[in-house]
Amino acid sequence: MIRVLVVDDEALIRTGFQHILNAAGDIEVVAAVSGRQALAEVGRLHPDVVLLDIRMPDVDGLTILERIRALPSPPVVAMLTTFDTDEYVAAALRMGAAGFLLKDTDPEHLALQVRTLAADGVVLSPKVTSTVVDGYLAGRTRSTEAVDRLSAREREILVLLADGLSNGDIAARLYLGVGTVKDHVSAILTKLRVTGRVQAALVAERAGLLRGER
């Protein structure tokens, strides 16, 4: 079972996500709480995935994200937002969020996205805009130059990573060992000068790899 903690200031959102995910069969929402309870529940329940509202009136979602990421073995955290151009999204990605979902995500896709997160995959709302990408990449090495540092195999793996595949999925697709894929992913992150898979996916998008431009 994939253990999920839902953190949102709106009870209706919490209840809706809880019902949708619990119906999936392989996912259990271990708690659905407001922001003030989030850190205590992460420490008590040790969820695999946290779905965290990026804006809450009682406590800042970015503050919670920072504190969760500082834990010894932090869960995967994806941000929930109603704003596809929310300036907070770029900050959350820089701080290590595994992606973000809009709160009006199609219920049929929600469980799939949680499974992807649990498998260390990348989850970005289809409504990710150039504003978000530019906000994350501002001031960093140009994406095209960064991608040019990669080998042909590393670019191939980067595209699959950006499509949301886990290391195991990539290994099966390319007939490689999982350990080999992990080594390649580590090299990709180092060469792109990013700290996580979502950041690497954004570089791939900006460089045109996902649209077949390179």
Image (tube, grey):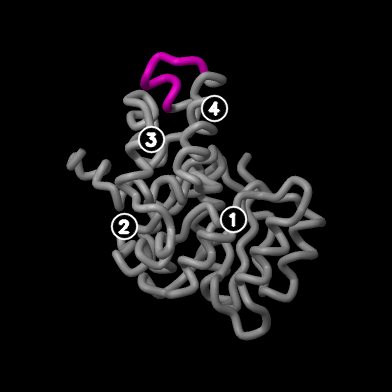
Q: Secondary structure at mark 4?
A: helix
User: Is 176 one of the magenta-colored residues?
Assistant: yes
Labels 1 & 3 near each other (Cβ < 8 A): no
For residue 182, what is the image quadrant? top right
56 vs 85, nearest the viewer: 85
Q: Nearer the viewer, mark 4 or mark 1?
A: 4
Spot occupied by residue 91 in the image (x, y as percentages of width and height)? 52, 67
Q: Would you name the residue on which mark 4 appears? A: 182
Q: Tell me how many marks there are.
A: 4
Q: Mark 3: few, some, or many residues within 10 Å (few <14, many ≥20)?
A: few
Labels 3 & 2 near each other (Cβ < 8 A): no
Q: Would you name the residue on which mark 1 appears? A: 77
Q: Secondary structure at mark 3?
A: loop
Q: Would you name the residue on which mark 2 appears? A: 126
The N terminus: image quadrant: top right
Q: Would you name the residue on which mark 3 appears? A: 149
Which numbered disc flags the more N-terminal residue, 1 or 2?
Answer: 1
Magenta stretch, residue numbers: 170-177
The C terminus: image quadrant: top left
Spot occupied by residue 86 in the image (x, y as percentages of width and height)? 42, 74
Where is 100 relative to 87, above or below?
above
User: Is 138 one of the magenta-colored residues?
Assistant: no
Q: Nearer the viewer, mark 3 or mark 2?
A: 3
Q: Is residue 167 left or right of residue 43?
A: left
Which numbered disc flags the more N-terminal residue, 3 or 2?
Answer: 2
